[in-house]
Amino acid sequence: MRAGAGLEELLHRLAPQVLGALVRRYGRFDECEDAVQEALLAAAVQWAEEGMPESPRAWLITVASRRLTDQLRSEQARRRREETAAATEVPAAEPAPDEDDTLTLLFLCCHPALSAPSQVALTLRAVGGLTTAQIANAFLVPEATMAQRISRAKKTILTSGVPFAMPPEHKRSERLRVVLHVLYLIFNEGYTTTSGPDLHRAELTREAIRLTREVRRLLPDDGEVAGLLALMVLTDARRPARTRPDGALVPLAEQERGRWNRELIDEGVALVTGALSGSPVGPYQLQAAIAAVHAEAERAEDTDWPQIVALYELLARVSPNPIVTLNRAVAVAMVLGPRAGLDLLGSLDADDRLASHHRLDAVRAHLLEMDGDHAAARVAYRTAARRTTSLPERRYLEERAARLTR
């Protein structure tokens, strides 16, 4: 089997599984992650030249284990000179474990010994495979701040003596909220990549959905787990229609809905319907319900915007945050007119979490265009284009601005 275009995606998918296997065996989180990164680099070079091994996961676990064992023996050799020769030998590798430790790794990263921000950051790094810069962008903080947070989280895991094992059933709910938030962020990074030439990173959305399915298998009666999975599949169903052949972004209202994945839509609608009827309402269920309303409209003009406004108002009470307000402003504009939406946006100008974010400028530009103020809309589109680090989003925003000059 030759390594081809899917090599990077394969390595990304296998990385948390390999890290989980090493942490289970050696218990040294930071050193294990370094060893895994070395193994991934070795695979990227060797597999591209020689082809992939029969079992890529076992190969990575074996190589990473050898790297880590060599490192540990080298440390001993510095204290005991007579072991120097042994430190350079390649040790016999243990068989790779059959189980996938990704879910155990996920819960470890969300251990109560870590602060909530550190739980999210470490999981995005270790399980989601995001770079420090991508995580910083997701949290709207400087990259250096995020790097320090991740480093402290690793040290806390090391010094706390946290066992590498699934938490007992009575403690799982303590970590579930953060686990779901992390999976939500991983999915969002895959669906709308924060930087670079591509709008999507399909490997991230697939991994987020896969992990969420695993959490649902573990907690089948939890409404918010079902709600998050519903939100993901309903959103991912629109992906085939979200870009043109040249990679240009297509907004929701202009998408060819016949290209949406009906199988995923049916799954998502069934999930959110069951969750809303059988458990307390939570934010992921409400977001999934909003996505379902969009999905069930055959044409953009058939969208039940009053229902979406009602759902956003409930969501704002259950989980108030600036992103909810931003999205609610669009829905309000569709029902009450663009000025009502712009008035709602005004409350976000003083919110440091969003005041300089391109999404606020982009939504304001859209509502100004709806209101007929093309000069102000053009300025807002250009401001949003300067602030985004996503090339497809930048091109789209610049095109919208250019169209208003004609």
Image: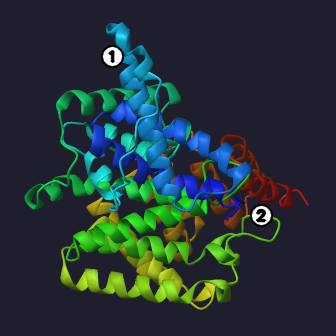
Q: Earlier in the sequence, mark 1 or mark 2?
A: 1
Along the viewing direction, whichever of 228 and 378 lies nearer the viewer: 228
Look at the image and tell me in which quarter the N terminus lies.
bottom right
Q: How many numbered discs, if any?
A: 2
Which quarter of the picture shows residue 149? top left
Which quarter of the picture shows residue 387? top right
Which of pointers 1 and 2 indicates the residue nearer the eye?
Answer: 1
Please say which color scheme the image uses.
rainbow
Residue type at tag 1: Gln
Along the viewing direction, whichever of 321 and 271 lies nearer the viewer: 271
For label 1, the crowd category at 10 Å Cα-Cα, with few meaning under 14, some 14 to 19 and many 20 or more, is: some
Per the image, the residue denoted by label 2 is 247
Look at the image and tell me in which quarter the C terminus lies.
bottom right
Q: Which residue is drawn at 44% across and 42% down?
A: 125
For label 2, the crowd category at 10 Å Cα-Cα, with few meaning under 14, some 14 to 19 and many 20 or more, is: some
Measuring from the top left, give residue 6's x and y in whole percent.
66, 61
Measuring from the top left, give residue 285's x and y in whole percent.
32, 73
Measuring from the top left, give residue 123's x and y in whole percent.
37, 46
Which quarter of the picture shows residue 176? bottom left
In this rendering, position of residue 76 left or right of residue 358: left
Residue 389 visible here: yes
User: Between marks 1 and 2, how big is the CA–CA gap?
Assistant: 53 Å
Residue 353 visible here: no
Secondary structure of the residue carrying tag 2 is loop
Mark number displayed over residue 76: 1
Work out whether 392 lies above or below 23.
Answer: below
Mark number displayed over residue 230: none
Work out whether 298 lies above or below 309.
Answer: below
Task: Please say if the residues under marks 1 and 2 sit with CB atoms less than 8 Å apart.
Answer: no
Q: Which residue is drawn at 82% across and 58% down?
A: 399
